[in-house]
Image (spheres, grey):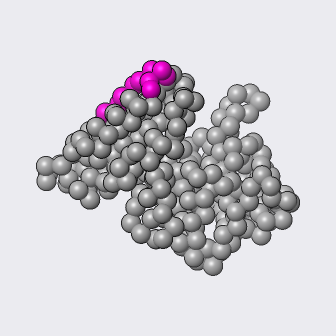
Amino acid sequence: MTAQLIDGNALAARTRADVSRRVQALKARGVTPGLAVILVGEDPASQVYVRHKVKDSEKAGLHSVLERHPATLSEADLLARIDALNNDPAIHGILVQLPLPKHIDAARVIESISPAKDVDGFHMASAGALVTGQPGFWPCTPYGCMKMLESIGYELRGKHAVVIGRSNIVGKPMALMLLAKSATVTICHSATQDLGAFTRQADVVVAAVGKRNVLTADMVKPGAVIIDVGMNRNDDGKLCGDVDFAAVREVAGWITPVPGGVGPMTRAMLLVNTLEAAERT
């Protein structure tokens, strides 16, 4: 068996096209969805991510504002900028690129964003809405993973899903989203003993720990769906995920590649969240 690929690039392109159509409908009503992206410092990876996000927004027809600030920006000044954006009717979504310089409390910054504009889905109000099944913004990466499962027509009800990783950004919200679809969910992490004992039982595995080859072929149930959220570099410096892709592909039924898998869908779901924030106004 060779697993079928879940093409994140193709699905993201379809998602962006749908966003563009809905943006045009909003513009016809006099509303242009607006996204503000704040970058503090010169982190090279963050600069790349931000550039892609702004480019995606503009292509989809959104109003995009990029604010670049030096790493010396004070926490008070950053909070003041967020407050101004919270009160700007032309801005429907606010994204503060992480990580932030060490002198700035990231949690305080995230909580200062209006829940109505929290398109990253990191605010406590967004997390609470996800836990209780209320309307809110889902974090973009696990939201994109759910859309990838949906794209292959996968029925999660009654299936066993294993999430490797327990971060607030991916692991925990991913588990909650799978649970909401009536999957039986197991969360594994760095203290889990015998990870393979859990993954070999899983119909779906989501690997999100940022560690190369955390999931190998002998740890996978034949025919399972494998979602690889990891972003690492191999010995040759090439981008790779958390999954031993070449070997696992020969066992799994479906698998996401890295690059070209979850990454493009993460960016696409940011556009969806921003659009929905504008539609709710």
Q: Is 65 on the left-hand or right-hand side of 246?
A: left
Q: Is 78 on the left-hand or right-hand side of 184?
A: left
Q: Is 46 on the left-hand or right-hand side of 31?
A: right
Over which residues does the magenta segment extend? 64-74
Residue 272 seen by the camera: no
Q: Which residue is drawn at 69% across and 43% down?
A: 210
Q: Dividing the image into 4 quarters, which one contains the C terminus?
A: bottom left
Residue 142 x %, y %:
54, 55
Q: Residue at x 51, y 67 (%)?
A: 131
Residue 36 x %, y %:
34, 38
* Position above or below: 255 against 62: below
Residue 141 x %, y %:
53, 51
Q: Residue at x 60, y 59 (%)?
A: 172
Residue 277 seen by the camera: yes
Q: Dividing the image into 4 quarters, which one contains the N terminus?
A: bottom right
Judging depth in this view, the residue of 171 and 242 nearest the camera is 171
Quarter of image, res 135? bottom left
Quarter of image, res 99? top right
Residue 183 x %, y %:
61, 73
* Position above or below: 130 against 250: below
Residue 230 highlighted magenta (yes or no) = no
Residue 68 highlighted magenta (yes or no) = yes
